[in-house]
Amino acid sequence: MRRLVDTAVKEGSFYTAVVFFVVLAAFPFYWMLITAFKTNSDLYDLSNIPFWFSDPPTLEHFCYLFEQTLFARWLLNSLVIGVCVVAITLAAALPAGYTLARLAGRNAEALGIGIFLTYLVPPTLLFLPLSRITTMIGLQNSMWSLVLVYPTFTIPFCTWLLMGFFKAVPREIEEAAIVDGCSLFGSFVKMVLPLSLPAILTIVIFTFTLTLQEFVYALTFISASSQKPITLGVATDLVRGDIYYWGELMAGALIASVPVAIAYNLFLDRFIAGITGGAVK
Amino acid sequence: MGHFKFVFDRPRVLGSLFLTPAILYVLVLVGVPFLLAVYYAVSAYTIYNPSYRFVGLSNFFQVVQSDIFRRTLLNTFVFTFASQILGLILGKFGALLLLRPFPGRKIVRALIILPWAVPIALATVAWEWMFDSLYSVINWVLIALGLLDQASAPNWLGDPNLAMLCVVIVNAWRFFPFAIVIFLAGITAVPQDVLDAATVDGAGFWRRNYQIIVPIVVVGLIFGTVFTFTDLSIVYLLTMGGPVNATQVLGNLGFQIGIVSGDVSHGAAVSLFMFPVLFVLVILMLRFIRRREI
C-alpha cells in the first residue's frame, strides 16, 4: 500500500513536471493561435476569459493580412530568398563537406574546424561593413542582399553537417566505382550523392529554416516594405505608430511559424546526428 | 607507376577545386567584412561622410566614456548570464524528463522544441502581446488568482527592472529547448563503443562523464552563449533597449548608432567590444574540440 502511494506520488510529480514544461514552451504559441482567430471586440475586453473564445472564431485577421498588407509579397520574398540560398549553399557545401570528410591529416581537420568557427562570427559584428558593401554594389534595400549574405552562415553550418554525414558513407563505395572505371568526380556524383539524399534533404530543410529565422541582417539591410522577408515584415511592418494590430500580428506570426515548427520536428533527429557525427569520429 | 601517381594526384586537384567555393565565400563575405569592421572602428567613417581617415583609438575612448555604453556593457553580461543560467537549469530538468520513456513523449518533445524552432522575432512578438500594458494575459491570470488588483498590475515592459526580467525570461525560454537537445545529445549520442573504450581504459563513471559527455555539452553551451551575447532581436522587438537604456545590449546599441544614426565608426567600435568575449569563447571551444579527439 505504501509502495503504491509512493509510486503514485512519483508518477504524479513526473507528469506535473512534464505538463509544466509543455505549458512553458507552448503557451506563447497557443496564445498566438487563439489571438489570431478572435474578434477584436473579444480580444480587447478584459472581462472575458482570455483562454477561449467569447465570440465565435473569425478569419477576419487573415483576410486583412492578405488583402490590406504586403503579407503575400513577404511570403513570396521569403520563398525566393530561401530557394536561392539553398542553391548557393548546396553548391558550396556539398563538395566542401565531402572533401573535408575524405581528406585526412591535420590540415584538413584544421580547415574543417576553421570553417565551422566562422559560423560563430555573429551578424552584429558584421552587419555594419556588410550593409556598406551591399550598398556599394547596388543592393541597398533589396532582398537580393540577403541572398548574398545568408550563405555566410549557412555554408559553414551545412559544410559541418555534411562532413558528418559523408563520413558515414563507406569509402569502399567510391573505390568500387573507381575500379569500375568511374573518375573520382564521377564516383562522387553517381555514387556518393544518391546515397546521401536523406542528408541533402536535411540540409535543404535546415538552410531554408535558417533563412526564415534570420532577423538581424534583414532588419539592417532592408527598410522597403515590398522587399522584406516574412519574419521582418510581420515583426516590424504590422505595427503602426503605437497601435498594434494584435490579431493580424498573431495571424501573420502563426502562418510563418507553422511550417518551420513542422520541418524542425521532422528533421531534428537527423540534425542532431549530423552535429554529433561531425564531432565524434 | 605513372598511372598510379595520376590517380593519387587527382584527389588533391579535385579536393582544392571542391573546397574553393566554400572558402572563397567565407573569406570574401566574413573575413573581409571583419577586417573592414576593425578599420571602421579606427576611422572617422559615417554614411554621410565616408572617409577612411585614421583616428586611432579615439572612437573607443569616446565610447567608453559614455554612461549609456557602460550601462549597456553591464546589461549585456547580466542578460547573457541570467538567461543562460535560467535556460540551463530548465534544459537540464527537461532533458532528465525526456530521457524516460512515457506515452506521448514524441508529442511532448515536439511541443518543447517549439521555442527554439520558431523564428525568434515572431515568438518575441507573441511575448510582447503577453506583456502588453493593458491586455497582458499574465496580469489577467494574476488578477484572477487574486494576487493583484487591476490598479497594481505591473507594466512589464515599462518598468526598468521588470523589462530586464522580461528580456531574460524570453531569451531563456528560447534557449532552453536547445539546452535540452544538447544535454540529450551529450547523454545519448555518445557512441557506446567510445564509452566502452573509455571503460576499458580504466575511466570511472565520473571521468567518462566529464571527459566525453561534458565536452559535447560545453561546445553546445558556448554556442548558446555566443548567440545570446551578440543578439539584438529580442531586445529590439520587446523594449528597444528601454526604458531609458535599462535593457540596452551591445548588439542593439551598435545597430542604433551604426545603422539608424549612420555613425558607422562609433557603431563598429561598440560592436567590437564583443570581440574579446567571443575570442575567449572560441579558444575555450577549440580546447574542448581538441580534447575530445584524444
Image (tube, coloured by chain):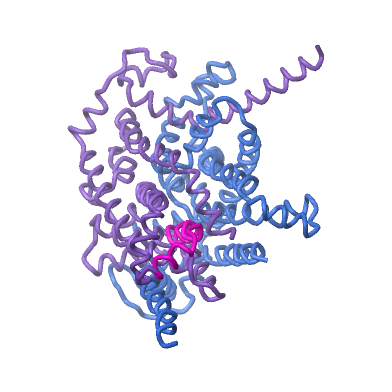
The spot of residue B183 in percent (x, y) is 62, 45
| Residue at horizontal 54 percent and vertical 70 percent from the top | A109
Q: Which of B212 and B225 is in front in this view?
A: B212
| Residue at horizontal 23 percent and vertical 62 percent from the top | A139
Whether residue B215 sits left or right of residue A164 in the image: it is: right
Q: Is residue B28 visible?
A: no
- Dominant secondary-structure state across the stretch colored magenta: helix
**Which quarter of the rendered picture does the N terminus of chain B lie within?**
bottom left
Q: What stretch is highlighted in magenta?
A: A157-179
Q: Which residue lies furthest to the left in this view?
A: A67
Chain appearing in blue on the rendered image: B
The spot of residue B273 in percent (x, y) is 52, 65
Whether residue B154 sits left or right of residue A191 in the image: it is: right
With respect to residue B6, does A62 lie above or below?
above
Report if residue B156 lies within the magenta region: no
The spot of residue A169 in percent (x, y) is 47, 58
Q: Residue furthest bottom?
A: B2
Chain appearing in purple on the rendered image: A
Q: Which of A99 and A215 is in front in this view?
A: A99
| Residue at horizontal 72 percent and vertical 23 percent from the top | A10
Whether residue B202 sits left or right of residue A111 in the image: it is: right
Instruction: Tell me the quarter of the picture where residue A233 sits.
Output: top left
